[in-house]
Amino acid sequence: MTRKTALITGVTGMVGSHMADYLLKHTDWMLVGGCRWRSPLDNIRHLIPRINSGDRVRLTEFELRDSFSITRLIEESQPDYVFHLAAQSYPKTSFISPVDTMDVNILGTVRLLEVLRTRAPHAIVHVCASSEIFGRVGQDKLPINEECGLHPASPYAISKVGTDLVGRHYAEAYGMTVMTTRMFTHTGPRRGDVFAESTFAKQIAMIEAGLIDPVVKTGNLNSMRTWADVRDAVEAYYKLVTVNPVAGGYYNIGGTFSCTVGDMLRFLLSCSTRRDIAVETDIERLRPIDADLQVPDVTKFTTHTGWKPQIPFEKTMTDLLEYWRARIKAGDLFPTR
């Protein structure tokens, strides 16, 4: 029997790299990682020996802005499963580069699905949207279910509304097995340092190493978040495409532990070897508008797939801090952003 092939776009990102790890461990599928030629390979460094030897995983360069490269990627890989994770994923950056964000996230998804429609219509496709599509939600709407109204609070969030709708459109219009997810806050090792919990952990690790003064700079600490571990998230994505996939399905996915960003920071500080760390608001870290109540109702997804998050908040955060400690101990240098 021919092995199944899974394509992971954005394989070098936090989620993409953990997705590859999960599939290599729990399936016998062949993996194709789609990435840009200039993408840093830090997150998949541990996979490079397997990539070099052709052991179930290979990289293919492509660009979501370029239909020709997408066509080559799909024709060469002929995927049975597609995890479309590549995106301009930083909300704050989207205020600086809104057109690029829309192009990559909305039109890039259209380009990918259009090629899949004609070159690999059999593929089961996961399109990754975001809980940011719900934006500013009132207390009376919590927890947020799939039918909650949309009030995106950044160009990134607007782009993910488009991504979500594009995925559902291709399922309804062309009979493709495309499903979309609105994943709520998920983090862990390899999280980019432009996100709050990761920049806090990185700053704490730099302070412990004596690289910067004992001050953690922050943005809005009052936003409420429900936290999930990225390693639980990729298991959810696997179940999405393998447990009775429903064309056009759309699901909220998230953890079970909620607290403010400030509470999360206090936990990280409690894990530090230093007890003299101050906290200071940096206006450059504040968004013009913030989605400040992100608490999901995941009943629809858990009922359908049986998925439940397993990794507690405390382990997620301590693993994130240890990730940054290890990188700094190895001599890697980072900006204080």
Image (cartoon, rainbow, N blue to C red):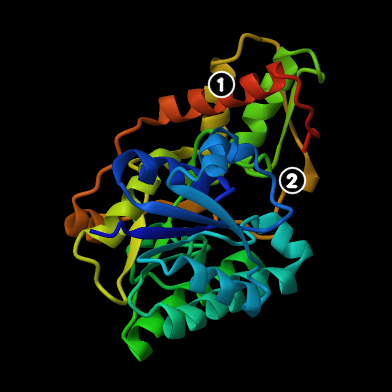
Q: Quadrant of the N terminus?
A: bottom left
Which quadrant is home to the C terminus? top right
Label 2 neighbourhood size at 10 Å, few (<14), some (14-19), many (20+)?
Answer: some
Q: Which residue is mark 2?
A: 285
| Residue 48, horizontal then vertical, whole percent | 58, 38
Residue 5 falls in image quadrant:
bottom left
Classify residue 42 by image quadrant: top right
> Measuring 75% from the left and 26% from the top, which residue is drawn there?
332
Q: Is residue 279 above or below residue 196?
A: above
Against 46, residue 6 (above or below) is below
The answer to which of marks 2 and 1 sits earlier in the sequence is 2
How much space separates mark 2 and mark 1, taking CA atoms? 24 Å
* SS class, disc 2: helix
Q: State the residue in front, 28 or 325.
A: 28
Judge depth for marks 2 and 1 and give the one in front: 1
Mark 1 surroundings within 10 Å by alpha-carbon count, few (fewer than 14), some (14 through 19), many (20 or more): some
Tell me the element at label 1: helix
Q: Residue at point 60% right, 70% down? A: 105
Above or below: residue 79 compared with residue 220: below
Q: Which amino acid type is marked by label 2?
A: Arg
Pinpoint residue 4: horizontal percent, then vertical percent.
Answer: 32, 59
Q: Is residue 283 left or right of residue 185?
A: right
Task: Write down the quadrant of residue 140 in the picture.
Answer: bottom left
Is residue 24 rendered to the left or right of residue 265? left
Q: Which residue is mark 1?
A: 322
Q: Residue at point 71% right, 26% down?
A: 203
